[in-house]
Image (spheres, rainbow, N blue to C red):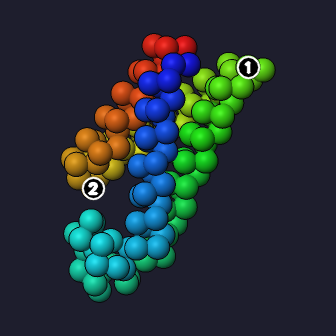
Amino acid sequence: MSLIATVAVLLIAALHAWFMVLEMFLWTSPKGQKTFGLTPEFAEATKTLAANQGLYNGFLVAGLLWGVIDAWSVATAPSGFAIECFFLGCVIVAGLYGAATVGRRILYVQAIPAAIALALVVLTA
C-alpha cells in the first residue's frame, strides 16, 4: 500500500476519533452543542444515545488502525488490505445513511472522504 493511501486511511481514523470524542465526552458541552446544532435540553436528554454512537465510531477507528498496521506487516499485508476495505466500507455506508436520514453535510464530511481513501487503498494495492 502506498504512503498516500495509508495517510488517507489514518485521516479517516482521526476524523472518527474526533467524532467519538465529540459524541462521548463533549456532547453536552458548548462545543458539542454548536457542532451538532443542539439545544442544551436536547443534548442532555440524548447524551446516552450519543455516547453509544461515539463508541461505534471508536470501533471504526480501531478497525482502521488494525488494517493499517496489518497492511504494513509483510506477513499479513493481504489481510490488512481486506480489513481496511471493510472498515472504510462501513464508514461509507454509515455516511450515506447519515446523509439520507440526518443531513446532507454528512455525505461530504464522512462518506466522500472515506470513498476517496478506499479508492486510494484499492488503486495502490
In whole angstroms, how far apart are the C-alphas of marks 2 and 1?
A: 41 Å
Relative placement, left or right, of 51 versus 112 is: right
Q: Could you say where residue 50 lies in the image, as x and y percent from the top left?
A: 44, 69
Residues at badges 2 and 1 in contact (C-beta under 8 Å)?
Answer: no
**At 68% from the left edge and 19% from the top edge, which residue is drawn?**
78
Which amino acid type corresponds to the residue marked 2 in the rendered image? Answer: Val
Picture quadrant of residue 108 = top left
Q: Quadrant of the C terminus?
A: top right
Q: Could you say where residue 62 lies in the image, as x and y percent from the top left?
A: 61, 47
Foreground of the two, 85 or 9: 9
**At 28% from the left edge and 78% from the top edge, which residue is drawn?**
30
Foreground of the two, 106 or 123: 123
Of the image marks 2 and 1, the number of the one nearer the N terminus: 1
Kindly state the secondary structure of the residue where label 1 is placed. helix
According to the picture, the residue beneath numbered tag 1 turns out to be 74
Which amino acid type corresponds to the residue marked 1 in the rendered image? Answer: Val
Asked if residue 84 is positioned above or below residue 96 in the image, the reply reads: above
**Residue 100 visible in the shown view:** no
Numbered tag placed on residue 65 in the rendering: none
Relative placement, left or right, of 74 versus 17 is: right
Asked if residue 82 is positioned above or below residue 60 in the image, the reply reads: above
Kindly state the secondary structure of the residue where label 2 is placed. loop
According to the picture, the residue beneath numbered tag 2 turns out to be 102
Relative placement, left or right, of 57 versus 28 is: right
**At 36% from the left edge and 27% from the top edge, which residue is drawn?**
116
Asked if residue 71 is positioned above or below residue 17 in the image, the reply reads: above
**At 55% from the left edge and 48% from the top edge, which residue is drawn?**
61
Task: Specify few, some or many for label 1: CA neighbours under 10 Å numbering under 14, 14-19, or 20 or more.
Answer: few
Asked if residue 119 is positioned above or below residue 17 in the image, the reply reads: above
Q: Could you say where residue 109 lies in the image, as x and y percent from the top left?
A: 29, 45
Q: Could you say where residue 86 lies in the image, as x and y percent from the top left?
A: 56, 32
